[in-house]
Structures are given as structure tokens and as C-alpha cells.
Image: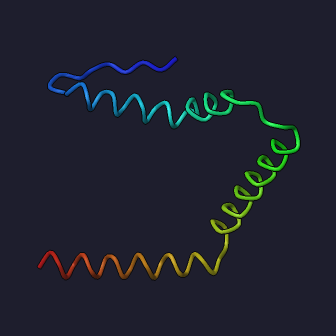
Amino acid sequence: MIKVTVRSNESLEAALRRFKRQCNYRGIFRLAKANTWHEKRSDKRRRERRERLRTIQKATRKNDPNLARVRAAAARKRARRRRITTR
């Protein structure tokens, strides 16, 4: 169960945004959406296979040593840009 307490000096809209974000993180919206209509077994298997492939590709990209160099270069570039704009 998700509980969101409204903080002092916080608008109701902000608390509602936090509630929606927590629901999204926990996958409640996805579960509700999945149960609103019937999904054929073959479609379910196909969708789950695509999701598995997506997570595998994401993990391989994360652990790719070549990509680590690209990320480091991009971080250096961002840091350089930040130093220029703060002067």
C-alpha cells in the first residue's frame, strides 16, 4: 500500500504528483492496465520475450567497456561546458 503524507507548505498537486510517481515506480499502473483487457497467451509470451530482450540489451550496454569510454568523454565534455558557463 502506498502512503503519501502531505508535507507542510506543500500543495495538494505536488503531493498527488509524488503519489503518481510512487505508483509508477511500483508498477501499479502497468498491472491495472494489463488487467483491463484479455491478452492472448501468444501475445503475452511475445511481449514478455521483448521485455526480456530489452533488459538484456540494457545490461550489456551498461557493462560494455567501449561505452564506458564514450560516457566518460561525454561527462568530461559536460564538465567543461559547465566550467565555461559558470565563469
Front in this rendered view, residue 87 or 50: 50
Front in this rendered view, residue 82 or 55: 55
Front in this rendered view, residue 60 or 45: 45
Q: Would you say 61 lies left or right of 21 here?
A: right
Above or below residue 73? Residue 60 is: above
Q: Quadrant of residue 8?
A: top left
Residue 31 place in picture, x, y as percent: 64, 30
Above or below residue 3? Residue 36 is: below
Which residue does the image show at 67% across and 73% down from the upper left?
64
Q: Would you say 51 lies left or right of 86 here?
A: right
Direction right: furthest residue = 42
Residue 87 place in picture, x, y as percent: 11, 79
Which residue does the image show at 65% across and 69% down from the upper left?
61
Direction left: furthest residue = 87
Above or below residue 41? Residue 78 is: below
Instruction: Name the colour scheme.
Output: rainbow
Which residue does the image show at 46% across and 82% down from the upper left?
73
Residue 46 place in picture, x, y as percent: 82, 50
Which residue does the image show at 49% across and 30% down from the upper left?
23
Q: Would you say 87 lies left or right of 44 here?
A: left
Q: Would you say 16 lies left or right of 10 here?
A: right
Direction front: furthest residue = 37
Residue 72 place in picture, x, y as percent: 48, 77
How many callouts does the rendering have?
Answer: 0
